[in-house]
Image (tube, rainbow, N blue to C red):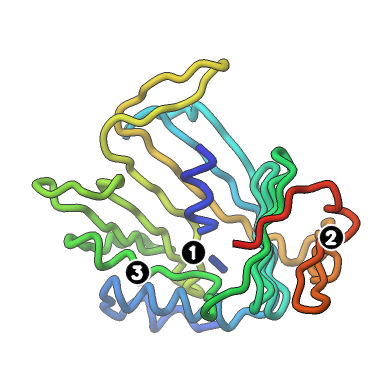
C-alpha cells in the first residue's frame, strides 16, 4: 500500500456564499485548491489512509495515518516510518525502517499540491454538488485504460476550497500483503482524508534543515541522528 500512498502525499480565506452559486469547471476548482494551499504559510494536517478490497467495500482491509505540515517554505510529510521534508532547494526522504536517507537537490520549485496535472490523464470530468462541498470526479476512457486508476474523486470544501478527501479507484488486479502472504485483489479503492490540526497542541517534528543534513565543501553530510543511515544523493 505504501507505494500508492507515497504518490499522494498527495494538499493544504475566501468567502463562501457567493462561490457556492457560481458554476465552476473542474480545472477552475483545482486551481482554487492549489491557490488555497499556496497561500497558507502554516498548516498541520493529520491524514487518514483507508485501503479497501474493492470498489464497494465498506470495511477497510488496511488503515494508516500520517502527517502533513507546512511552516513557511518547509513542507513535512510522514506515513508510518517514512518521512519526506521539502526545504525548497533540497528534498529529503527518510526511510526509518530501511535505515536510508535520500537527499537530493530540487530541480524546480515545487508546490504543496498539484491537481491540474491529473486533467491530462482523465478525459471525462464532472462535478457533483453537495451543500458543503463539491466532488470533482475524473474518469479514464474505458476503451483505453492505460492508467492504474479508473476513477479519482476529489472532495473540495465550498467554504474555503480546502481538500477534504481523495478517493482513488484502482484498475484491475493488484497485489496486497496480508498476514505475511501476498494476495491478489480486484479493483481496490484507496481513500485519503485530511483533518485540520493547525490549532491543536501537538508534537511537531523538526523542520530545521541542519537537523537532517549540512553541506560542506559541496558535500552533503547527514546529521548525527542519521549517521548510521545509508546516504543516497541521486
Judge by depth and name the residue closer to the eye, 122 or 101: 101
- Residue 178 lies, with reference to residue 201, above or below; the image says above
Mark 1: few/some/many CA within 10 Å (<14, 14-19, 20+): many
Whole-percent x and y of residue 48? 58, 46
Of the image marks 3 and 1, the number of the one nearer the N terminus: 3
Label 2 packing within 10 angstroms: few (<14), some (14-19), many (20+):
few
- 16 lies above or below 9: below
Q: Name the residue furthest left.
A: 143
| Residue on which disc 3 sits | 117
Q: Residue at x 36, y 74 (%)?
A: 29
Q: Which residue is mark 1?
A: 163
Whether 141 is drawn above or below 51: the answer is below
Ranked by sequence position, the earlier of labels 3 and 2 is 3
Report the Cα–Cα distance between label 1 and label 2: 22 Å
The residue that disc 2 covers is 201
- Cα distance in 3D space between marks 3 and 1: 16 Å
In the figure, residue 232 lies in which quadrant?
Answer: bottom right
The location of residue 26, given as percent across then percent down, is 29, 71
**Foreground tag (3 vs 2):** 3
Amino acid at each position: 500500500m505504501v507505494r500508492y500512498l507515497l504518490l499522494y502525499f498527495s494538499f493544504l480565506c475566501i468567502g463562501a456564499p457567493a462561490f457556492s452559486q457560481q458554476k465552476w469547471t473542474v480545472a477552475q476548482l483545482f486551481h482554487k485548491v492549489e491557490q488555497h494551499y499556496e497561500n497558507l504559510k502554516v498548516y498541520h494536517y493529520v491524514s487518514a489512509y483507508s485501503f479497501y478490497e474493492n470498489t464497494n467495500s465498506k470495511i477497510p482491509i488496511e488503515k494508516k495515518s500520517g502527517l502533513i505540515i507546512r511552516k513557511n517554505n518547509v513542507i513535512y510529510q510522514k506515513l508510518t516510518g517514512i518521512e519526506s521534508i521539502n526545504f525548497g532547494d533540497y528534498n529529503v526522504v527518510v526511510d526509518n525502517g530501511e535505515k536510508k536517507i535520500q537527499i537530493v537537490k530540487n530541480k524546480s520549485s515545487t508546490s504543496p499540491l498539484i491537481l491540474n496535472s491529473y486533467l491530462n490523464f482523465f478525459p471525462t470530468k464532472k462535478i457533483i454538488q453537495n451543500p458543503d462541498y463539491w466532488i470533482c470526479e475524473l474518469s479514464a476512457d474505458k476503451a483505453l485504460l492505460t492508467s492504474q486508476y479508473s476513477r479519482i474523486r476529489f472532495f473540495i470544501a465550498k467554504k474555503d476550497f480546502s481538500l477534504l478527501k481523495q478517493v482513488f479507484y484502482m484498475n484491475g488486479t493488484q497485489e496486497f500483503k496480508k498476514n505475511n502472504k501476498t494476495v491478489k485483489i480486484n479493483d481496490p479503492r484507496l481513500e485519503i482524508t485530511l483533518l485540520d490540526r493547525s490549532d491543536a497542541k501537538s508534537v511537531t517534528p523538526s523542520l530545521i534543515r541542519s537537523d537532517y543534513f549540512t553541506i560542506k565543501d559541496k558535500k552533503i553530510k547527514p546529521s548525527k541522528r542519521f549517521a548510521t543511515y545509508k546516504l543516497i544523493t541521486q
